[in-house]
Amino acid sequence: MTVGVREQPRGADPPRPRPGARPGLVGWLTGLAVLSGVGYRLWLLLHAAPATNSDEATMGLAALHIARGDGFPVWFYGQQYMGTLEAYLAAPVFALAGEPSLLGLRLPTLALYALFLLLAWRLTLRLTGDRWFGLLMVALLALGSDRIVKNQLIAGGGYPEMNAAGAALALLAVDLATGRPGRRSADAGRPDGRTADTGLPGRRLARWATWGFLAGLMLWVDPLVLPYVAATGAVLVGFCRRELWGAAGALLGAAAVLGAAPLLLHSLLTGRNPLHAVLAASGANASAGWPDRLHGGLVLGPGLGMGFCAPGQCATWQLWWALALPLLLAIAAATAWRALRTPDPNPAGSAAVGSDAVSPRVAAAARLALVLAAVATLGAYTVSSSAGLTPVESSRYLSCLLISLPALLWPVWTVARHGLRPSATGRRGVGSTLAGSVAVVLLAATLGTAAHATWRAAQTVPATQAAEARHTELVGTLRQLGVRHVRAGYWTCNRLTFASAEQVVCAVVDDTLRPGFDRYPAYRWEVDSAAAPAWVAPAGSPLAEVLDERQRVTPGSLDLVTIEGWRIYLPR
């Protein structure tokens, strides 16, 4: 009766339901969690949240120019780094809608978040084979603090697409390492004798090309994801190095060049090195003390960047994650390394027939790669001056750490599951029970802290919606007054130009009325050539105070129009 039955190691994951079977409770709950995460973010978008700014408007203007055929920018306007992929994704939306809008600009970022959620779920199943743990990951990633939803929804360049690309790179690396030629995969035992990859070489080559293209594309879009490119690439080298010497390696290289083509062509044509601009933006040209860097990078950064803090601040009790993260990194790295060094108990196949998990050694290597990528990301951020100078806002540089969550929390989940599960003899050691209880508390605290931060972020939506309504009134008032050209501060100008679809063109000035930083110089040229540009300033701002003083010094030189939150100065 036991002939042909494969012996599975103790503790092996249960087989997944056969294809076509109805989803069980965990399947329905996972689907509900996915819908909740996407629905929450759609609700935010419909209420103009999170708050937009002129940097996002700059990406929107690039999308508008692409949709009109007026230009095809390689870089974010005004700098030589951070590719404009989001603008190219939003341009078709603008073309179909007939006009630009904040919602149209953010619909592609919402789609990227949904893709990341599904990829993270699938990657979790491939690494662990545990669908309940996959549900936990989806539930955690469905939550969204202020910093998290800003990273995922604001089309300000790079952040919405990095997590989806990083998860895809990891998943592709796992699939390629699992189904490499000469190794029978989880599909072994099919009637035709073929495996999933080796029987369909075209599909395998497509995966190699996709991995290379995504790696090159991210090199153009934003270098923050490069630790994950390098780490997942190391998995491929470790398990598939023979293939890399052949057609697969050549295809990967060609696809990577294609993905990075905008960066490479621009560098060749202009002779500029984008790495220099990236280092300058990271604070390499500024100075910050090591105490400030360590506090911003290791204390404030993890809680803010990974979604455990209220909008713009971290309460003392929310900083517990800064203490837990180094321990989780160390434990996850140690357990993954031990599993990687352990001989595969089932060398003939990747796992039990029909299971979600892959070869234990491949899964361990991928988890170790995700942990090392997280360490590199955290370390690079901590040594940068940005962590010390602007720790609250620059915590967005830790956005990619979410990709590593399955690897970080898997040991905790394992301890919680085995520590509290009754043993075969009905007895469980005190130490094992205590460890399981601590693990459960840690998982509950992780979910609870993220849920509290999400609730606090949702509370800011009415104020954000009201501010957007005031800005809409400003645009309408300028149109009614027939104002075509204005001067305003940096955080007003491009937002005003985008919201008016370039019917109002703005040039940047500082608080002393001197010319400021215009990301799109054509706007300044147009405003400077206008007969009598108006001035626009937020009520109570330093710029408004300077213009009010100018009115007092030279009475009658400006006519003042006020609306809630804004002051418009019209030259006579």
Image: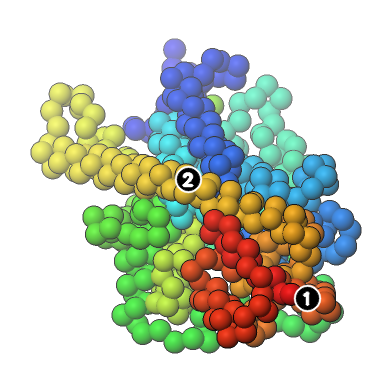
Distance of mark 2 from mark 1, alpha carbons?
Answer: 37 Å
Residue visible at 43% across and 19% down? 25
Residue 243: image quadrant is bottom right
- Give the mark, 2 or 1, whose residue is nearer the N terminus: 2
- Across and down, in percent, residue 514 comes to 64, 85
Residue visible at 29% across and 34% down? 417
Q: Nearer the viewer, mark 2 or mark 1?
A: 1
Q: Is residue 178 visible?
A: no
- Across and down, in percent, residue 225 comes to 57, 62
Amino acid type, label 1? Ala
Seen as rendered, the residue at the extreme right is 69
Image disc number at residue 177: none
Q: Is 431 on the left-hand or right-hand side of 79?
A: left
Q: Is residue 12 visible?
A: yes
Amino acid type, label 2? Val
Number of residues whose C-alpha sits closer than 10 Å to that of mark 2, classed few (under 14), some (14–19) or many (20 or more): some
In the rendered image of this protein, does residue 387 appear above or below residue 225? below
Q: Secondary structure at mark 2?
A: helix
Residue named by callout 2: 461
Residue visible at 70% across and 46% down? 104
Q: Is 114 on the left-hand or right-hand side of 385?
A: right
